[in-house]
Image (cartoon, rainbow, N blue to C red):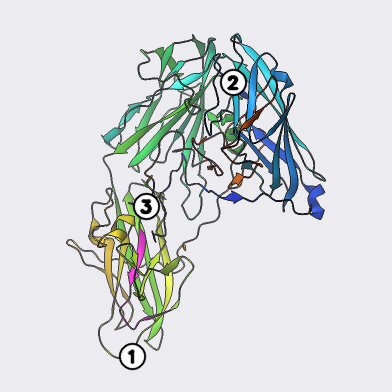
Amino acid sequence: MHSTRTRRTLGAGSAAVVAALAVGTAALPAHAADHQLKIFVAGSYQLPTDPAAQPQWGENVFMHVGRTGSGPVDNVKLTLDTSGLDGVATLTAKGCAAAGKTITCDIGRLDYDNINLTSHLWLSALPGTKPGTSGTVHATLSAPGAQTGTADFRVDVGAAVFRTKAPSQEKDVKVGSKLPSTLEFANHGGLPAKRAIVNVLLTAGLKVDTWPSNCEYAADKGAGWGKDRPMPVTHAICTIDGEIAPGQAVKLNGLDITVGSEAYYDLAGYSVFTTEDAYGNDGADLRKQLSFQRGTGAPATLVKSAGEGIPAGLDVNGHSTEQEIVAANGADFEATGGWAPDASGSAGTFTVGMGNKGPASIFDRSGGEGAPNVVVQFPEGVTVTDLPATCRADDYVHGRKSDKPLNKFACDGIGSTFMPNAASVTHKLGLKLPGGAGELTATVSLQNQESELGDGHPSAVMPWDHNPANDLVKVALRGGAGTGTGTGTGSSTSTPAPTGAASATPAPSATVAPAGLHGSAGPSPTAAAGAGSNGGSTGAQAAGGNLANTGSSAVLPLAGTGAAAVVLGAAGLVAARRFRARQEG
């Protein structure tokens, strides 16, 4: 469809960048010697003792590769030495070549600082392997003229491993309420766990008044992506000592979450691990990026639970879950418009925008049905002489392109996924008016994917906005400067944002290291790497070892990804773990 915004999953989160990486054999650039090749992989992977065949597109080891410096590196090869897996496990890599206990994957051209592989790596325990048995895989990334990168990862068979229960959504929660943590998990490994490391992530509307003394916490201003606003989150790492036996289920106790004044749709995300270096544990990366402080409250504990509803399968995201909290709150979105003619009276600047008058900060996980664009309809004869890059012609009616220009323009709203309380955005368009003295009126309205396919305002349903009257304003273009006047019942007069207000293009997002990966200063938006294979090719298996899967970041393995995968920045971790937002139909 023509919408300027597409629906997406975030992930805490969220928004995500997907791109394709070309594989080539062009001549090696002269500056290739300045490149350092890098491998990003978790320090350890835990396998069940029962052998498991690799499903189509399956992966349970996630590896990224990259290079420092600018420009491509050609003829890149990944070599996996599986001799350290003798008697422990097998490693399989689809589309790669196996010779004895060595697997070689042809990466080809590498032109990213961090990108996932497409040779899906799969580990499986050998029959009869005893719980507690470990092995090691040694990985090498090399290319002519570039500095070689290496990394090792450990394979633990039958070790303690946690699986979480997905809690039900909390609805109509009053602002100011305190909710106990809903984290419940079980040890589905073959050995007891000595402790549980619980990573907590809270979105902007949630907080913990007093963190337990066995938790460290830090504020994260968030990482914007694309044209979205950064979403602030709170991270915490809680280490709770005490043995958790195989098959035992427990529930986190002593962590109460307060629903703040800006809450509407919010998430409390949990990931639980047995070791610091386990796949998916982003604690080490977070400590490098943020300033943590220790809590002062009574320590959090684990209490036994029945464990009903906790799956024990091979779900690679099974260590994570999230509590969805919908507060009995809302936010008043308003359209704004203003006209400032020059001395001639026939030309000037039209300011169009929107604001969130709160009290809630809105996290619109669907990324389309609710989050609006700002649409301005000019009368016939009015000419737009200066159109900012944040606005574009909108010649569509009911989702179909008109056979003639409509003199209608759509401009970016506050954001497509996160719209903070008190945030606003403005755009300035140059106009030239036609001659004459007749009335000329421009209409500014908030529109989203739903209304664009329908009859427009007031069908732009935003469930959090209980005052839709100011979602549409009219601005007179004759008779001097003017501001928009609301047209609905209970209408209000809008005021234009002040001159020089923030324009529509936030700075590019900072890059953040994927969780559980070694040696990363942070990935840039990643793409699917052509690894000399297509997803349907037969995997090569080395004797005594099999290749780890590589289709996504350690934060969010995506089932069914072929030549592309999604990597999220720190704020995107919020929604990444299990929830699948509505997809574009």
Query: Which residue matches tag 1?
Result: 435
Q: Is residue 552 above or below residue 128?
A: below
> Which one is closest to the eye, mark 3 or mark 1?
3
Amino acid at circle 1? Gly
- Asked if residue 375 lies in the magenta stretch, the reply is yes
Q: Residue 454: horizontal and vertical position, in percent?
A: 26, 60
Task: Assign the N terminus to one quadrant of the image.
Answer: bottom left
Dominant secondary structure (helix, strand or loop) of the stretch shown in magenta: loop
Amino acid at circle 3? Gly
Q: Residue 137: horizontal and vertical position, in percent?
A: 70, 24
Q: Residue at x 80, y 53 (%)?
A: 31
Asked whether residue 275 appears in the rendered view, the answer is: no
**At numbered mark 3, what does the secondary structure look like: helix, strand or loop?**
loop
Q: Residue 178: horizontal and vertical position, in percent?
A: 32, 29
Residue placed most toward the observer, 334 or 116: 116
Q: Quadrant of residue 530?
A: top right
Query: Which residue matches tag 2?
Result: 124
